[in-house]
Amino acid sequence: MRKRHLKAVFLDTVPVLTGYLFLGMGFGILLTENGYGVLWALAMSIFVFAGSGQYLAVSLLANSSGLLSAAIATLLVNARHLFYGISLLEKYKGAGKKKPYLIFALTDETYSLVTQNEPPEGMSRHSYCFTVSMLDHIYWITGCTLGAL
């Protein structure tokens, strides 16, 4: 990827960066105040990446609801992604190895960026979508981890 492409995508994602850092920090703080350490925050932000669902999961875990209950509740809270993700089927067609991550990393903010913005000149649509998704995910991981620390 060209440096100018990364810079352009970064500039597109700055509003998400500011939001995810603060919301992620709140999550990390809440998680540690409920007895879970920084590794939980890091793992949840990497493997769950569900925003409001993660906040809900903290309450469920802290109240001994169990991991299965927390997973089901998180899935239900984030089920909206299934509905608006359908509109991306055509856009993500032919994404190859990037497609699983594009599906996993779909958030409200990422959806907004990949559906409304055009990639910089010389950058493919799939690369643009992947880079937006990756940067947004990194912002969330960073915020959650900083909050837990």
Image (tube, rainbow, N blue to C red):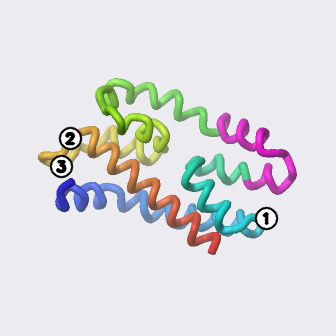
Q: CA distance from mark 1 to mark 2?
A: 43 Å
Q: Residue visible at 46% across and 41% down?
A: 106
Which stretch did the figure color magenta? Answer: 58-76
Q: Which residue is mark 2?
A: 124
Residue 20 vs residue 55: left or right? left
- Which amino acid type corresponds to the residue marked 2 in the rendered image? Ser
Q: Position of residue 15 (x, y in %)?
A: 39, 60
Q: Position of residue 19 (x, y in %)?
A: 48, 61
**Residue at far bottom of view:** 149
Rendered view: 148 above or below 63: below
Tell me if mark 3 has few (under 14), some (14-19) or many (20+) residues whose alpha carbon lies within 10 angstroms of its own.
some
Q: In the image, which is nearer the foreground, mark 2 or mark 3?
A: 2
Residue 13 vs residue 22: left or right? left
Q: CA distance from mark 2 to mark 3?
A: 8 Å
SS label for mark 3: loop
- Which amino acid type corresponds to the residue marked 3 in the rendered image? Pro
Q: Which residue is mark 1?
A: 34
Q: Is residue 65 magenta?
A: yes
Residue 39 vs residue 18: left or right? right
Tell me if mark 2 has few (under 14), some (14-19) or many (20+) residues whose alpha carbon lies within 10 angstroms of its own.
few
Q: CA distance from mark 3 to mark 1?
A: 43 Å
Rendered view: 28 above or below 16: below
Q: Residue visible at 46% across and 61% down?
A: 139
State yes or no: discs 3 and 1 in contact (Cβ < 8 Å).
Answer: no
State yes or no: discs 2 and 3 in contact (Cβ < 8 Å).
Answer: no
Q: Position of residue 148 (x, y in %)?
A: 64, 70
Q: Which residue is mark 3?
A: 120
Tell me if mark 1 has few (under 14), some (14-19) or many (20+) residues whose alpha carbon lies within 10 angstroms of its own.
some
Who comes first in sequence, dot 1 or dot 2? 1
Q: Residue visible at 32% across and 32% down?
A: 96
Q: Is residue 60 magenta?
A: yes
SS label for mark 2: loop
